[in-house]
Amino acid sequence: MSTKIPFSKADSNSNNENFRTYVLSGGGTGGHLFPALSLADEIETAGHKALLVTDNRGLAFFKHNQRMPSLVCTIVRNHWLFGKFVYPFSLGFQILRCFLWLSKIKPTAVIGFGGYPSFPCVFAAQCMRIPTILHEGNSFLGKANRYLLPKAKKVVLSFPPTKEQLLDSRFHVTGNPVRKGVCELINNTYIAPTKENPFHILVVGGSQGAKIFSTLIPEAISKLPKTFQKRIVITQQCRQQQIEETENKYKTTLCKVNLKIFLSPIENYYKDAHLIIGRSGASTVAEVAIAGKPTLFIPFPGSIEGDQAQNAVQLVDKNAAWLMRETSITPEKVARFLTTHLENSDELLEKAQAIRSFAYPDAAKNVWKIVAEII
């Protein structure tokens, strides 16, 4: 499947001898695509063209963005009839498609944002000796990036490098590019809630919402004293199929509730939040750090290499956030946590200040500078 992106200001510069085309390839989740979209904006602001490659899951994100993917690489990892036997053939087919497509568009460089769907395009580019740059949003290199690392020209990181990476001149800490509106929150000052005013909680579950939050948070709030329940205003990201069930669970509480399938523009929701409860994917960590909001991370336990947990640990070790494991969390634990901060907001303010040390509002510019320098 191939879709032409809408006309952009970069198209008008296509006759310029300095005009370049860049390919940005990433998996179909927000953690991979939001950084790619941010860099695409930066590239086109510089007068060049950015073409995006993702899989069919990523198409959902483009409903909320004027840009469309130029190539959709969907890899079948497990077939109902052929099982995992189909995976190498599907991967090989997508690599071949990328070879043909890259041969046609002749990009200046290819930037990979991780996730297995990013592999075919970056691998094909490396075989064709097209310069490649890897972006890693998590606190350690994912599997796709590890395979592609030997032939990568540069690697840009969202978290501080390991000891081994410090010895490799290809590694650079740039931060994780996030949406432009979120970057503007860097100048906002956190105002701690008072006992007389509403306590705004924002619950984010990643790009698809988190099923556990639809049960865990209402049950936790129902265990609070009624005076505390009345103060709470909940805005929660929720899957479409969970909306009705979640609404019914909140009816047993006295808090005000606003359920959303997609938080857009998300910066508007970050602004009002006194506390954020959510997963700890790369984009979420980067965004709450820029927003300067105290956050309780509940990492997704199903991430294959535990990347979400390791992201959260980076902040917890610096006393910049809280962490609860889904495997041991209970409504009672969350209720005690909320009670503590409804009674005393001092620690909320401390975390809001500490989390800003992980903020990189100029991450997209930082990545673009690295990309431009290797040409």
Image (spheres, rainbow, N blue to C red):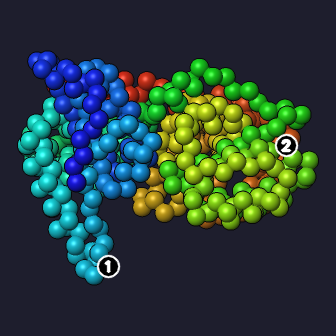
For the N terminus, give its image quadrant. bottom left
Q: In the rendered image, is residue 231 in sight?
A: yes
Left/right placement of residue 52 relative to residue 240 reads: left
- Using the rendered image of the protein, determine whether residue 174 is visible from the camera's viewpoint: no
> Would residue 215 appear left or right of 370 to someone viewing this image?
right
**Residue 279's x, y, as percent?**
56, 51
Residue corresponding to mark 2:
231
Q: Earlier in the sequence, mark 1 or mark 2?
A: 1
The amino acid on which the numbered mark 2 sits, given as a three-letter code, is: Arg
* Residue visible at 29% across and 44% down in the picture: 69
Which image quarter: residue 194?
A: top right
Amino acid type at circle 1 is Trp
Q: Are marks 1 and 2 in contact (CB under 8 Å)?
A: no
Q: Residue farthest to the front?
A: 7
Q: Nearer the viewer, residue 241 or 300?
A: 241
- Which numbered tag is attached to residue 80? 1
Q: Position of residue 371 (x, y in %)?
A: 25, 28
- Count residues near mark 2 (Cα–Cα under 10 Å), then give few for <14, some for 14-19, many for 20+: some
Q: Which residue is at 62% across, 63% downward?
A: 242
The residue shown at (26%, 52%) is 72
Front residue of 166 and 143: 143
Give the camera-side residue of 221 and 335.
Answer: 221
Q: Position of residue 102 (x, y in %)?
A: 12, 43
- Separation of residues labelled 1 and 2 (CA atoms): 50 Å
